[in-house]
């Protein structure tokens, strides 16, 4: 049977933090990884309460893989780790910002960031 994200309040996540989260229908919130010293946006992944708890307590980014239905620690297989410097919730509690020191590529394609695919044309831009 495939794994499912942890239900809210079933992990060791601090209850005060869990109460601030606004999750989607699957119990997930988007997590933006940003290079801590340059501000470069590296990638977006999904976290549930357990992934956020693991991220906060291990100092390594842990995400919920929707395609594999399992937790994954960034860098465990690729060596391209994200070392956590700080974690913040946005004003609505529906997005997590993780400032990291990225070791190697952040994108599964081998690019430094998942946003290297090119910019889109913008009127007047």
Image (cartoon, rainbow, N blue to C red):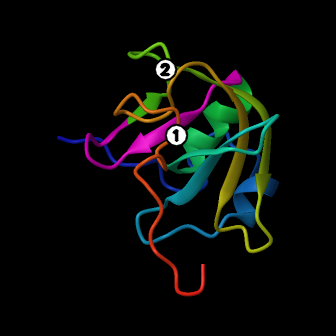
Query: To which residue does mark 1 refer?
Result: 113
Rendered position, 125 above or below 100: below
Q: In this image, 28 relative to 109: left or right?
A: right
In the image, taking residue 99 as reference, residue 71 lies left or right, namely: left
What are the residue bounds of the magenta stretch? 58-70
Looking at this view, is 45 or 101 the one in front?
Answer: 101
Does the segment drawn in magenta span residue 65? yes
Question: Can you tell which mark lies on residue 19?
Answer: none
Which residue in the rendered view is the most extreme toward the front?
124
Q: How many labels sit on residues?
A: 2
Residue that mark 2 sits on? 75
Looking at the rendering, which quadrant does residue 38 occupy?
A: top right
| First of labels 2, 1 by sequence position | 2
Q: Residue at x 26, y 40 (%)?
A: 68
Q: Residues within 10 Å of mark 1 (few under 14, many from 20)?
A: many
Q: Position of residue 3 (x, y in %)?
A: 29, 41
Residue at (56, 41) in percent of width and height: 50
Q: Nearer the viewer, residue 110 or 63?
A: 110
**41 and 95: which one is in front?**
41
**Residue occupying image coordinates x 38% and y 15%:** 77
Label 2 crowd bin: few (<14), some (14–19), many (20+), radius 10 Å: some
x, y percentage for residue 102? Answer: 63, 26
Percent position of residue 75, x then y: 49, 20
Q: Secondary structure at mark 2?
A: loop
The CA span between labels 2 and 1 is: 14 Å
Give how far across and how far down residue 34 sits, in percent: 68, 43
Judge depth for marks 2 and 1 and give the one in front: 1
Q: Quadrant of the N terminus?
A: top left
**Residue located 60% across and 78% down the image:** 125
């Amino acid at each position: 049977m495939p794994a499912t994200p942890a239900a809210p309040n079933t992990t060791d996540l601090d209850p005060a933090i869990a109460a601030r989260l606004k999750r989607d229908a699957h119990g997930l919130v988007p997590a933006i990884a940003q290079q801590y010293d340059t501000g470069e946006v590296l990638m977006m992944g999904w976290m549930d309460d357990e992934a956020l708890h693991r991220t906060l307590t291990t100092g390594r980014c842990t995400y919920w893989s929707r395609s594999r239905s399992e937790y994954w620690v960034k860098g465990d297989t690729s060596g391209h780790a994200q070392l956590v410097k700080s974690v913040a919730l946005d004003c609505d509690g529906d997005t997590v910002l993780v400032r990291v020191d990225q070791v190697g590529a952040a994108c599964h394609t081998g690019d430094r960031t998942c946003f290297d695919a090119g910019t889109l044309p913008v009127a007047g831009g």
